[in-house]
Amino acid sequence: MESKHLTNDFEHQESSLNVRLEVFEGPLDLLLHLIKKNEIDIYNIPITVITQQYLQYLEMMKNLNLDVAGEFLLMAATLLYIKSKMLLPPAEEEPAEEGEEGIEEDPRAELVRRLLEYQRFQEAARDLSKEPLLDRDVFVRKFFEKNLLEGAEEFLAGEATLFDLLEAMKKVLQGIPPEEFQEISLEQMNIKEKIIQIMDRLWETESLTFAELFTASTPRPEILLLFLALLELLRLRLIKVYQSGSFGPIRIFSPIEKEEGHKRIEERIL
Amino acid sequence: MEDFQWKAVIESLIFVSESPLSLDQIKEVLGEVSKKEIQRLLSELQEDCERTQRGVTLVEVAEGFQFRTRPQHAEWIKKLKKTKPVALSRPALETLAIVAYKQPIVRADVEKIRGVDSGGVLRTLLERKLIRILGKKDVPGKPLVYGTSKQFLEMFGLKDLSSLPTLKDLEGLGARPPEEAFSFSGNELNKQEPAATQESGILPGKEAETDEPPAEGAKDSF
């Protein structure tokens, strides 16, 4: 797919290349592309041509003010080194030099080996993605309880009550150091923002513990706001909270899918 | 109980379990029925699903059995569920493939193959629970050793790691078989006719015999 975008990249150097460049994962990917594009025999790479094109590409990246990752530069150096070695008359090399069964015979051999190895895994990745993927091609019944069982084995308990939450909240507030200097902030904090923040994290990770909502540096007003947001979400039934045993960790889940959740937040919270 | 009844019991067990149900788990529940018998009934169940063209198939995945829908029905199911599957990016998929085939593997070795920093991708895969940390390698720096998880097998519908698609040898790119010592697989070299190379005057046949250690071929063909 990526090579489709790239076949004419040299012709359109000025226009919107920044997007296209990103499709190269690294120097090996770029080299494989150049080899394919030029229909080169990988076992007999014309190193001069490839080096030239490779450097052209790097130049282009620089012209576009893109960060040329160190790996690309290292490969450029490798290519130039190989090129210089190819120019030298074939010297009688001690075969034991690297202890690798005469791999040093051809200066390009090591690079070819890496390219082939990398290519194998590119293909393996492609093959893997052709398998019937769960939740893309095939589906299974979904169990909400599965979330509960994952990660924490201690989860046997039922839904947490408001008092459990308050208890947990107290612990959080006790845990933060008393502020010696009160920062006066003009920043308006908004409960809806916090609600969306919590929900986005939930949709990202499936579940959160109560403690994970806060960090050690979360300021007190924000903690309170997050807590209010949590209560509001509970009221709207956008989240479910479970606790394992009394005083155990409280875990928060969202029983609602992302899109539906966003809709509800928009509808019910101003 | 009669055969068909046990079959139905097994079917119900698989139906209610949230993750692939292993033979051992079924055996534990059924008690008196032998594993061999359960195995036979499971195959029968699989055949039943096929023969009657049911909407679900019984699939052996992640060392257990699970009812799954058929790929050709995906379109309708997606319409019902209205959710977009979270796709893996190309770097993620590639890294996952490397970990899958090369595990146990440390980050440095992943990066050696990919030629780029892979810390971020590995972290993403860890977060998505497709790979897991197997331990630490006993070398300076004690790097983490990665392997694939049960979720990986479930996601790709694999019975176990041995059912990974075989790593392809060097095709594509219009490549000739390697005539020099940097061939990966002794098999490949022997199967195909080696072409003489312009650079090296080495006789390919001889080279293959003398310089190709058998261990190398074995290591690389999975």
Image (cartoon, helix red, strand yellow):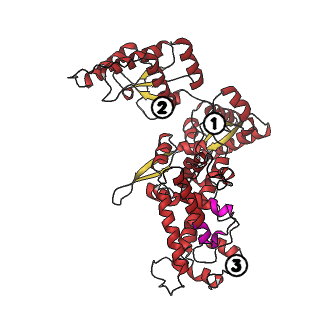
Check residue A46 for magenta coloring: yes
In three-dimensional space, the C-alpha distance between marks 1 and 2, rounded to whole angstroms, equals 20 Å
Which residue has dot 2 on it? A149
Which residue has dot 3 on it? B195
> Callout 2: residue from which chain?
A
A180 left or right of B210 in image: left
Which residue has dot 1 on it? A135
**From which residue to which does the magenta span run?**
A33-51
| Main SS, magenta residues | helix
In three-dimensional space, the C-alpha distance between marks 3 and 1, rounded to whole angstroms, equals 46 Å
Residue placed farthest to the right in the image?
B52
Q: Residue at x 56, y 13 (%)?
A: A267
Count the marks: 3
Q: Residue A240 carries which label?
A: none
Task: Locate residue A244, reporting x and y percent.
Answer: 40, 25
> Callout 3: residue from which chain?
B
The amino acid marked with disc number 3 is Ala
> Callout 1: residue from which chain?
A
A253 left or right of A187 in image: right
Mark 1: which secondary structure? Answer: loop
